[in-house]
């Protein structure tokens, strides 16, 4: 992915994030996710339908990297099974750790390919993933 | 001024996060190395020359602190790990034994977490009440607002001398007079005050003062708890152990040492204490009056340059210290900090540990520039040049 394309994707999802809405209905599980090293703080709302992730939304305050990453993640996880979602999440972690990963699977998530080079921003990009992973693992217990 | 004293300042870096911690001059670093290299023995322990030297250096710092804050007695100066520990000792060692259910403690919404959370614990533990002195339009504490909050249940006023987000100086002397006329104790969080302006505990007549070494050119992990002697006598040691006891044959016969030793259990941060002494000498040589004067000049220069920039919203146009808190229109504070970092400029983004301030200011997070005497007009020019280019900020913040 070209640098300019990555930048454009991140800015688009930061300025116009998708699924940024609070959900108070009982169908949604709320998970707070924050970075101890910085001030990003997001609430993620997730609705399961048996094994399928039917909907995800979020709200909160965070930097451009966190907000855009959340928007992209949600877009890519809705309608996936829990297992598919976990596979996506682990691929994203592998990418941000500079390891080999399935590029095709991540789609716009590839915009964060070089984030591992900026140690302090890696946590911003992975913030929503840690929240959603926790919610999925809890639901599988 | 005095830039040549700071090793970091020979690097290509602009350090504007002095309220978090100040830089350390070479003399402080050398002094701590001197301890580790030349007399690395324990304090208060050995009957040999090396240990005697340690004792001399250690107690010499106590003398320096006493003069620096103009305490009446040496015993009123207790070494701690920092302002946080000092405040926790004051709250848990003294006030936890003094306050009763429904007693009221006055703080403000712009206090640092260290001057909020220990009191919150007493709310849970003892059923005391924490109340907030309202801030005025500029987020300042006025004597009138303190007066309005006082009633016969008010037992403590615990506030920062200067706050760490707004940088406002509180009228401590007047507040203390009012407090004492009403039998109220005054605790001052001096973390942002002692490094910048002359604090005279006798003149201010405050009951307790807490501050840290690392914000005043000293080492990390060292701070001071000052308390009036007659009050410190009743401060129950939180830590019990070596160095602070006379004898302990059985639980009924534990005899503790005199002040201040009984409040300094265990092997202290000796290098830190000695380094703090050197930092005080260093600040005395420059002169606190010159330090604050330079900070004011630098701040005015910065504010005058920021005000005309339309996309910058300054939270504290007025302030008594070197702190400027602001936001860039529609840009998250942390993104601004990341942007500046690309140009080797260090600023802080966040709530600066004053999490309840948002209820007063209406803004959760800000970018904070905090200046100290060694910053320069050129550094401010560089900062302003970057901040004035909105397109550049947005382009380079990710």
Image: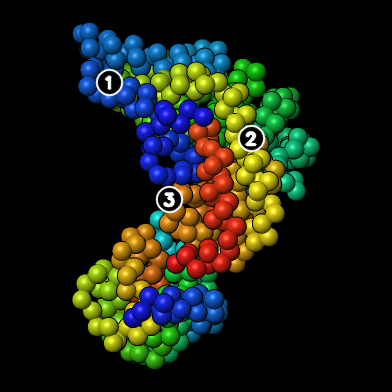
Task: Give the SS element for disc 3.
Answer: loop
Query: Which comes before the other along the chain, label 3 or label 2?
Result: 2
Percent of width and height locating residue B337: 49, 56
Q: Is residue A100 above or below residue B32?
A: below
Is disc 3 surrounded by few (<14), some (14 to 19) or many (20+) residues within 10 Å?
some
For the residue pair B233 and B174, the one nearer the viewer reads as B174
Disc 3/disc 2 C-alpha distance (Å): 23 Å
Disc 1: host chain: B
Residue in the image at 28% along x and 25% along y: B33
Contact, mark 3 vs mark 2 (Cβ under 8 Å):
no
Tell me, for residue B298, which label it has, or none. Answer: none
Q: In this figure, which residue is indicated by the disc labeled 1?
A: B34
Horizontally, residue B381 falls left or right of residue B173, namely left
Tell me the quarter of the image containing the N terminus of chain A: bottom left
Q: In this figure, which residue is indicated by the disc labeled 3?
A: B344
Q: In this figure, which residue is indicated by the disc labeled 2?
A: B297
Query: Which comes before the other along the chain, label 1 or label 3?
Result: 1
């Amino acid at each position: 992915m070209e640098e300019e394309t990555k930048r454009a994707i991140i800015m688009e999802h930061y300025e116009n994030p998708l699924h940024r809405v609070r959900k108070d209905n009982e169908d949604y599980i709320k998970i707070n996710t924050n970075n101890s090293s910085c001030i990003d703080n997001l609430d993620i709302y997730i609705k399961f339908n048996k094994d399928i992730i039917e909907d995800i939304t979020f709200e909160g305050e965070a930097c451009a990297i966190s907000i855009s990453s959340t928007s992209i993640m949600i877009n890519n996880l809705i309608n996936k099974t829990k297992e598919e979602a976990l596979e996506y999440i682990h691929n994203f972690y592998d990418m941000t750790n500079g390891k080999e990963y399935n590029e095709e699977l991540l789609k716009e998530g590839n915009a964060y390919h070089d984030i591992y080079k900026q140690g302090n921003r890696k946590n911003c990009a992975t913030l929503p993933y840690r929240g959603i992973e926790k919610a999925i693992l809890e639901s599988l217990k | 001024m005095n830039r040549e004293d700071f090793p970091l300042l020979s690097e290509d870096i602009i350090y504007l996060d002095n309220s978090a911690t100040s830089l350390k001059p070479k003399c402080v670093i050398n002094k701590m190395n001197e301890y580790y290299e030349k007399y690395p023995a324990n304090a208060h322990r050995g009957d040999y020359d090396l240990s005697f030297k340690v004792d001399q250096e250690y107690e010499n710092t106590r003398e320096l602190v006493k003069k620096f804050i103009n305490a009446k007695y040496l015993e009123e100066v207790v070494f701690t790990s920092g302002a946080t520990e000092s405040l926790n000792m004051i709250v848990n060692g003294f006030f936890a034994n003094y306050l009763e259910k429904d007693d009221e403690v006055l703080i403000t919404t712009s206090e640092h977490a260290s001057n909020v959370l220990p009191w919150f614990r007493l709310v849970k533990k003892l059923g005391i009440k924490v109340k907030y002195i309202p801030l005025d339009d500029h987020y300042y504490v006025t004597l009138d607002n303190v007066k309005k909050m006082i009633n016969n249940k008010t037992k403590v006023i615990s506030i920062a001398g200067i706050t760490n987000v707004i940088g406002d100086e509180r009228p401590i002397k007047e507040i203390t007079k009012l407090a004492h006329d009403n039998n109220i104790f005054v605790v001052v969080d001096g973390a942002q005050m002692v490094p910048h302006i002359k604090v005279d505990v006798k003149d201010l007549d405050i009951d307790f003062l807490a501050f840290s070494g690392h914000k005043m050119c000293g080492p990390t992990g060292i701070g001071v708890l000052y308390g009036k002697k007659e009050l410190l006598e009743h401060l129950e040691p939180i830590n019990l152990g070596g160095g602070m006891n006379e004898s302990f044959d059985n639980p009924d016969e534990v005899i503790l040492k005199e002040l201040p030793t009984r409040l300094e259990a265990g092997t202290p941060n000796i290098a830190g204490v000695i380094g703090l002494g050197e930092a005080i000498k260093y600040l005395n040589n420059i002169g606190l009056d010159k330090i604050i004067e330079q900070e004011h000049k630098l701040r005015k220069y910065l504010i005058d340059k920021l005000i005309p920039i339309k996309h910058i919203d300054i939270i504290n146009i007025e302030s008594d210290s070197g702190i400027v808190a602001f936001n860039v229109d529609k840009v998250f504070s942390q993104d601004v900090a990341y942007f500046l970092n690309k140009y080797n400029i260090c600023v802080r983004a966040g709530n600066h540990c004053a999490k309840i301030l948002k209820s007063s200011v209406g803004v959760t997070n800000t970018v904070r520039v905090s200046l100290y005497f060694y910053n320069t007009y050129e550094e401010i020019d560089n900062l302003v040049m970057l901040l004035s280019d909105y397109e550049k900020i947005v382009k380079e913040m990710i």
